[in-house]
Amino acid sequence: GENVEQHPSTLSVQEGDSAVIKCTYSDSASNYFPWYKQELGKRPQLIIDIRSNVGEKKDQRIAVTLNKTAKHFSLHITETQPEDSAVYFCAASGRKTSYDKVIFGPGTSLSVIP
Amino acid sequence: DAGVIQSPRHEVTEMGQEVTLRCKPISGHDYLFWYRQTMMRGLELLIYFNNNVPIDDSGMPEDRFSAKMPNASFSTLKIQPSEPRDSAVYFCASSLSRSLNTGELFFGEGSRLTVL
């Protein structure tokens, strides 16, 4: 089955700097790659996603890139702010037969230091 | 819509007791997922349903765990008997079929289970 790895497990940056989180996946059939943000004590919430027919997607200060050949994708946060502090999860999902299975990476705890 | 609703929010029980967690997905969503979150193992997919039918339960830890979805608006995750290692936050999430939507998972607020 699908296996998603994520690095680093913890990341600390100064406010205003950029943060990059990288993920790899194992199943070449995966075609949908979402990123979720989970603030302390809260539920995970989708912040951005990318499909396999796209190499890059941006939404204000966040961007995702996908390299299907290498089976890795990354989250980039620019001009980080204290409210970006949270745990970020990447995930991979693919359509096998007619069903989907969303598998999460282990998470990256991001701390933005004011 | 009120979103995905889970109950109870917190449950403290003693080892050996039966635990039932409940979930009401967003109306109209045809996928329902149960995840378990711990510090050590992150977000683990336990089981998911499509149109109330269990599709993949390979993540269910052992026979002590069972899940049902008797109708489109209700699902339960049961642990019997519970053990201290079952202590975790259990999330329910729902989604629309990918062909109709972005595939986004909408999570409930979670049920924090503590087994003493």
Image (tube, coloured by chain):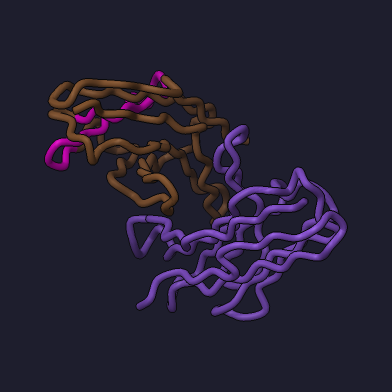
As displayed, is residue A5 above or below residue B63? Answer: above
Magenta segment includes B107: no
In the displayed structure, B41 sits above or below B100; it is above
**Nearest to the observer: residue A41 or residue A28:** A41
Q: Is residue B103 above or below residue A107?
A: below
How far across and how far down the image is residue B91, in percent?
Answer: 55, 56
Image point (62%, 32%), residue name? B40
Seen in the image, is B68 located left or right of residue A65?
A: right
For the record, the magenta segment spans A58-77
Q: In the figure, A78 relative to A43: above or below?
A: above
Q: Which chain is brown?
A: A
Q: Nearer the viewer, residue B49 or B14?
A: B14
Q: Which chain is purple?
A: B
Give the percent coordinates (x, y) of residue A105: 49, 33
Q: Quadrant of residue A90?
A: top left
Q: Main secondary structure of the magenta part?
A: strand
- Is A60 part of what is drawn in magenta? yes
* Image position, residue A80 (x, y; %): 18, 30
The residue at 13%/25% (across/down) is A16
Q: Which picture quadrant has residue B12?
A: bottom right
